[in-house]
Amino acid sequence: IAILPISYRQGMSLRLRFLPLPHETQLHLIWRRGDQNPVLRNFLTICHDAVATGNYNQLANPA
């Protein structure tokens, strides 16, 4: 199971099934304390900024 943007439907295998989510969906994040992976750090920063500003569009199109 994965949560993906609707744009992933194009060009994907016909063996995959995409189901729309309700308009508002909760997203919970869990990670290992002390994990210094730069990709994880960047992802957490993007998520934190989105919550702080209320601009959730940046989750779909981060700068």
Image (tube, rainbow, N blue to C red):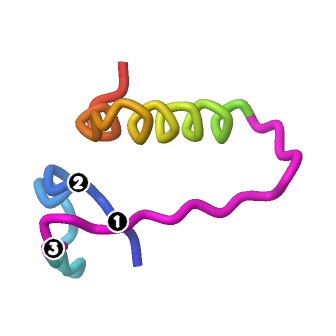
Measuring 39% from the left and 70% from the top, which residue is drawn there?
Answer: 2
Q: Which residue is mark 2?
A: 5
- Percent across and percent down for residue 63 are 36, 18
Tell me: 35 left or right of 43. right
Q: Quadrant of the N terminus?
A: bottom left
Q: Give whichever of 26, 40 is nearer the camera.
A: 26
Residue 20, given in percent of the width and then of the height, sits at: 13, 73
Label 1 sits on residue: 3
Which amino acid type corresponds to the residue marked 1 in the rendered image?
Ile
63 relative position to 19: left or right: right
Q: Which mark is residue 18?
A: none
Q: Residue furthest top?
A: 63
Q: Which residue is mark 3?
A: 22
Extreme-right residue of the structure: 34
Query: Which structural element holds mark 1?
Result: loop
Q: What amino acid is found at the position of numbered circle 2 in the picture?
A: Pro
Task: Decide which of tag 3 and tag 2 comes sooner along the chain.
Answer: 2
Total tally of numbered discs in the picture: 3
Q: Nearer the viewer, residue 23 or 43?
A: 23
Residue stretch in magenta:
20-37
